[in-house]
Image: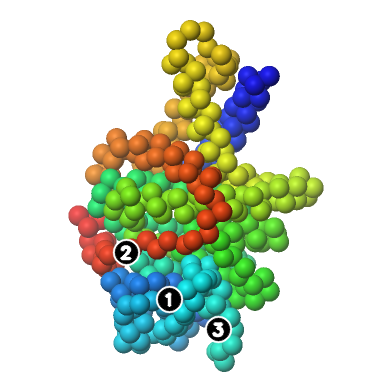
Amino acid sequence: MLDHVLLGMQIVLAVIGAYQLCLTFFGWYRRKSKKQFAPQKSFAVLVAAHNEEQVVGALIDNLKALDYPKELYDIFVICDNCSDRTADIARSMGVFAMERSNPKLRGKGYAIEWMLKELWKMPKQYDAIVMFDADNLASPDYLRHMNDDLCNGSKVIQAYLDTKNPNDSWITAAYAITYWYCNRLWQLPRVNLGLANFLGGTGMCFDSKLLKEMGWGATSLVEDLEFTMRCVQRGVNPTFNYDARVYDEKPLTFKASARQRLRWMQGHFDVARRYFFPLFWQGLKERNWAKLDSAVYAINVYTLFIGSLLTVFLWVDIALPGVRSYTSIYDFSPVFFTVLTTLTYIQFPLALLIEKAPWKTYKYLLLFPIFLLSWWPITFYAFFTQNNKQWSHTEHTRVIRLEEMQSKQVS
């Protein structure tokens, strides 16, 4: 009986894996550029910051120099429970410093919810809201691309997420590889197929009317994923702009990375519990592929959790002396499933190739499998601690300016 249950679980996981692999083939090409518009949309640019005095100045300089009419956007730094000079730096640089103090409701989701309520009270209103993290940098044409997408009918937009410090360590390189893969072979296929894209926590743009109508309401540890699910439920599919670039600082050490990823996975379990079944049944009832696809994405954390446990269980069964007790799906067609597994891992170097990543990044592919395997214990621990809603801050210290980063890419 147990053998049949385990085999059935393997089949379900294989189907999900094959589905996601098939989607990647639709990221090999890019559609022609969308219609461009003269700057007309006004933006409130929100910067979420908690004790970010070391890096916030570089982002403010970057945002003030965007290639967009200055009268059409204002910058607001959300100084959330700060005990350093973040607010003073923001004010000294001529942008709005919005100070919030609420130690009981900590985290980016709560800070954004508070800021939006403050924003709606202001006499000046904006067509759209843009959100960044304090450690980010944006491409000069970022707002022009958001303006084009809004004018083309998009209500929620995610920019291309890149890494501003990919070569600082093997950990930052692993993040960079993951980002290149997700942008090209995860987000772009869904653009080409007309499915919903997924918000990445920063570089996000929202139509103000939609935000006022929906409210933010995303205060979990993964507010971006939670708001994505809320949008898809309402039939609003977030879109992805490949040309608008946002560069994010990634943690240097494995310990800091594990802490960050644990928070992500704890939040992902929470969102999966609340949104998978409603989205899945909605998708079936409405025959809506975007909702079904988003439901599969929501449950990915359980797919990884169960898949890792099954793999370890079967490895142990093979390693033990004597006759094996359980059937592996590989027994039915070793060649097919070996090819499927190989193709799954080939996607990452393929993404580097398609995205024209710097050649020096390829050497980090040797350690990348370790990074991938490290998700297993992190996800396992997250499953048993998923009720922990305590937000943890990731410290940012790399003061890199856009010109410096671009000069390194050219060299």
The foreground one among 27 and 279 is 279
Q: Residue furthest top?
A: 322
Q: Secondary structure at mark 1?
A: loop
Between the residue at mark 1 and the residue at mark 2, the CA separation in whole angstroms equals 16 Å
Reading the image, the residue beneath label 2 is 396
The foreground one among 363 and 69 is 363
Q: Is residue 43 left or right of residue 232?
A: left
Q: Please report the residue visible at 28 percent of the width from the left and 45 percent of the height from the top.
A: 170
Reading the image, the residue beneath label 3 is 118
What x and y, as percent, mark residue 368?
34, 39
Reading the image, the residue beneath label 1 is 81
Q: Please report the residue visible at 52 percent of the width from the left and 38 percent of the height from the top.
A: 304
Do the residues under discs 2 and 3 have CB atoms within 8 angstroms?
Answer: no
What x and y, as percent, mark residue 179?
41, 50
First-in-chain label (1 vs 2):
1
Coloured how? rainbow
Do the residues under discs 3 and 1 have CB atoms within 8 angstroms?
Answer: no
The foreground one among 108 and 121 is 108
Q: Please report the residue visible at 79 percent of the width from the left and 47 percent of the height from the top.
A: 285
Do the residues under discs 1 and 2 have CB atoms within 8 angstroms?
Answer: no
Q: As shown in the figure, which amino acid type bears the numbered disc 2?
A: His
Q: As shown in the figure, which amino acid type bears the numbered disc 3?
A: Glu
Quarter of image, res 230: bottom right
Q: As shown in the figure, which amino acid type bears the numbered disc 1?
A: Asn
Q: Quadrant of the C terminus?
A: bottom left
- Which of discs 3 and 1 lies nearer the camera? The answer is 1
The answer to whether residue 153 is above or below residue 98 is: above
The answer to whether residue 295 is above or below residue 320 is: below
Between the residue at mark 3 and the residue at mark 1, the CA separation in whole angstroms equals 16 Å
